[in-house]
Amino acid sequence: MSDRTHLGSKVRRLRRAQGVTQVDMAKRLGISPSYLNLIEHNQRPLTRSLQMKLAEGYDVDLQVFAEDEDARIVTDLVEILRDPLFASFDLGAKDLSDSVGAAPALGQAMIALYQGYRNLRADLDAVSERLSDDALISASTHELRTVLTSIRSFSEILRDYDDLDAEQRQRFLEILVKETGRLDQAADRMVDFAKGEDLAALGGLASAVDDVMDFIQNHNNHFPELEAAAEALWARAELSERSLESGLAAYLEKACGVRLRIAPSDVPADFDRSDGTLALSEALPASSRAFHMARCIGALRCQQSFDPLIEGLTLSAEDSASKLREALASYFAGAVILPYEPFVAAARELRYDIERLQQRFGASFEQVCHRLTTLQRPGQRGVPFHFVRIDPAGNVSKRFGGSGLRIARYGGVCPRWNLHAAGASPGQILVQVAEMPGGSRFFCLARSITKPGGGYREPETRYVIGIGCDLSYAEELVYSDGLKWEAPETAVPVGINCRLCERSDCRQRAMPSLVAPAASA
């Protein structure tokens, strides 16, 4: 039986929060107190019917019983505790699972503490590397000496030669001013080097990215407030599918006082608050222009919706709040260009055919995939998808585990995942049934994408987008047609990544596993 049905810790937390005894709760559920006790200690499964009774009897959302959050915390802790720092502690996955089940906030605190430790170590390593870089110090010292020699030479000329005419004297004075400016810049660079201010900024960036990803995951990538704001904009601005771009441009100018300008720039979008101008690169396709206009509207008009979502959060970096607002503005933009009700209806009608959804809504492949992960409105839910984006080096720049698939917080992704093969097959959607070490299976799609550059000196940016769902939803997707997706031989054994994979016989393993080998069947 799947581990997902063992949710005893959540039942126990719910019962205690409601202030009821096992006898009272068992009576309401129509089971014996002893059976409820077994459920709470994960000795019996919490069936779907019992979940429904709990939700109705105690007025809670069924999402309370989604195990994804606890399992994600356990996965992160397993990886963290394999750090040599914790080598003397013998904690297994079951110990962690029991602890997280009893006190998930403690697990989250541990993750936040470890992230702070990693950031500090990264800063210290970077400082150490810079201090050991003799070439950098030597070059800076040489520059200072060169500038000082130049200043001294021209100063001596001005002092020792009284017969210089006015034009010559002026020219030497201008050289002195210029060299003094170079000296000032060189001194500033040396001060920055000594203080390490730029390193602190780099350390904070990684934390801000993690804060954004965790925030999206904790909200299941669905924000009803922003969906409502996007629908209100459609009514207020009288937008239409045929003239969405022009309608957004008109609303920007009329309601926000922002003028649109198309510019020959390698920067996709640049909003200048001082003169109220939104400059969009001429290289952007229509879908991206509409997105950036909607994003600008969100940043200007939706702060009252953003603030309650961010207030009270414990964040890891100074710029995390601004990064979260940028992420929320992007969510709002996606909800504007791909409005919820028409989009979810089309997704069902077209059986989640991403390319046909692109054609119908004039959106990019990535925009459609992003939007598919947000369809969690009660009564109008879509298939729950996970989403991941990697660059050619395998770095994960976006991740969301909406399907229940675990995506590692640190490190890359499994080399057997079809993401990597998609990078070698431009524009082609690759399909894969991925089986995780625990036996769970996922229906995964992957395709490479390119984002426009700025010409020869600014080439295109390449990524691979991965999106997928639990295998139980596969038949709802057009990509499952003609594929024996239920057959065991169709599944490809994959893992989270090499460090967290239990498979001892993988021929593509790049580094030793940090977890115990999987037991043979």
Image (cartoon, rainbow, N blue to C red):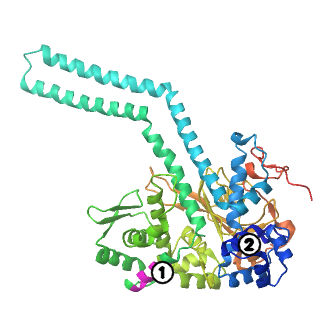
Q: Residues within 10 Å of mark 1 (few under 14, many from 20)?
A: few
Q: In the rendered structure, which amino acid carries the disc numbered 1?
A: Ala
The quadrant holding residue 347 is: bottom right
Name the outermost residue toward the right.
521
Placement of 135 over or under 31, stated as above or below: above
Identify which residue, 3 or 157, lies in the foreground: 3
Location of residue 282 by image quarter? bottom left
Q: Do residues under tags 1 and 2 come within 8 Å of each other at their CB atoms? A: no
- Residue type beneath disc 2: Val
In this view, the mark in front (1 or 2)? 2
Residue 223: x %, y % from top left: 53, 74
| Residue, disc 1 | 228
The range drawn in magenta is: 227-235
Q: Main secondary structure of the magenta part?
A: helix
Q: Name the residue that disc number 2 marks.
A: 11
Q: Which mark is residue 17?
A: none
Tag 2 secondary structure: helix
Q: Residue 69 is drawn in which quadrant?
A: bottom right
Residue 230 highlighted magenta (yes or no): yes
Q: Residue at x 24, y 29 (%)?
A: 180
Q: Nearer the viewer, residue 186 or 202?
A: 202
